[in-house]
Image (spheres, rainbow, N blue to C red):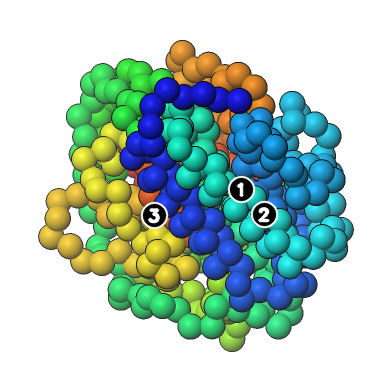
Amino acid sequence: MLHPAHPVDAQASVTAARFADVRGTSLALAADLSEADQTVQSMPDASPTKWHLAHTTWFFETFVLAPHQPGYRAYDPRFAYLFNSYYEQAGPRHPRPQRGMLTRPSAAEVVAYRHHVDEAMASFLDAPDALPPALADLIELGLHHEQQHQELLLTDILHLLAQNPLRPAYRQTPTATAGGDARPLRWHAYEGGIYEIGDAGEGFAFDCERPRHRVLVQPFRLADRAVTNREWCEFIADGGYRTATLWLSDGWATVNREGWQAPYYWEQRDGAWWSMTLHGMRPVEDGAPVCHVSYFEADAFARWAGKRLPSEAEWEIAATPLPVAGNMLGRGALRPLPAAPSQDDAPAQMFGDVWEWTSSAYGAYPGFRTAEGAVGEYNGKFMCGQYVLRGGSCATPEGHIRRTYRNFFYPHQRWQFMGLRLAEDAG
């Protein structure tokens, strides 16, 4: 049992309000989905909606309530096996590729499970003793973990609905309209030198964003917006998917094995490209950022364009003076939008719209140390074979993304809201 020595402080009340907001958002995202929608798993990389809702609840039950709330009773002890994801130290788990076989518990019982844990957490957060900093940090980690799963919930339901020949929409009517065609591409130059990147410890960050450290960067230029669908169509028309010399060896093997001819979810109808979106099938919008492309595709496009992908250090240097704002989940578009015309001498779309592939492999920063306990398995053990993406997407919750945020996926994956921005050497 924890025995902090100080009375209730602002940290506890802010955490309680934030907890309620984040947890409510998850339920709102699932509210219009049927029981069947929430149960089916469309591929091993995706998870059913109700599993996302249950797993994020399991996190708080397992790491906060069970060890720190005296007398807490688990809603159902069997759920520890069903809804653990990859935490070896937390015990055995149901195989990931078989999550769609969990027809029970029902979606309604998963919501009841959430209410049970939320009520216990509300009581815990309203206790007369202030939260020790370490425990407040753990709860904040759980909230950011849930926000990650909110985005995954959307990308996974999009993948599921795309498998249905009816191409049903997650939501029928977009709540934000497009901003017209993309603005003309411009370039921003950055001086070479020694820079500091990584989290400085002034707020929440995942462990993989730390420690802050120095990097040597050569002079470079960065495109002021993301690559658009129109530009990607030019790549396709010029034989981009048929030209082996543009591709990394593993990428070319993947193109041929999978039969890639366009970004994920694209298909041709009467000579025009259409794409499956969270609003159903829609014509590909020329000025919007291209989306659902793998690292292999992004790298090949950059070669075709005579450019390259930025490193994550270059991306962060360019993003550092910019506000963390853009087309994210709260806007309601649920799809990338064209970069609006602007007189600002700064890159656009650095936050929101699409996660941007970088050329950087996902690895540990100098001085990185894995946290003790099961939460130490959160990021560090995945630092192998993946590439870093930056900036968030149209499905990323506001308040979750940062300039130092490091997302990571394997180079062949593309069901997430993944796009790219070009860079080039300036020396």
Q: Circles 1 and 2: CB distance less than 8 Å?
A: yes
Does any portion of residue 182 appear in the rendered image?
Answer: yes
Q: CA distance from mark 1 to mark 2?
A: 6 Å
User: Cβ–Cβ below 8 Å for labels 2 and 3?
Assistant: no
Marks 1 and 3 sit apart, C-alpha to C-alpha, by 26 Å
Q: Residues within 10 Å of mark 2 (few under 14, many from 20)?
A: some
Instruction: Locate the N terminus and report the quarter of the image it occupies.
Output: top right
Q: Identify the image quadrant of the C terminus.
A: top left
In-front residue for pair 268/17: 17
Q: Quadrant of residue 114?
A: bottom right
Report the amino acid beneath label 3.
Glu
Residue at 51% in and 24% down: 3
What residue is rendered at 70% in x and 37% in y?
71
> To which quarter of the image does residue 43 belong?
bottom right
Residue extending farthest to the top is 367
Residue 33 coordinates in the image, percent (x, y): 66, 73
Drawn side of residue 233 relative to residue 324, left or right: right
Where in the figure is residue 160, as x and y percent of width and height?
Answer: 70, 67
Q: The residue tagged with tag 3: helix, strand or loop?
A: loop
Label number found at residue 398: 3
Image coords of residue 424 (percent x, y): 33, 39
- Residue under pointer 1: 120
Q: Amino acid at mark 2?
A: His
> Nearest the camera: 357 or 250?
357
Query: Which residue bears the numbered disc 2?
Result: 116
Q: Residue reaching furthest bottom?
A: 270
Q: Position of residue 154 (x, y in %)?
A: 58, 62
User: Which residue does the image show at 32% across and 26% down from the upper left?
Assistant: 200
178 vs 266, nearest the viewer = 178
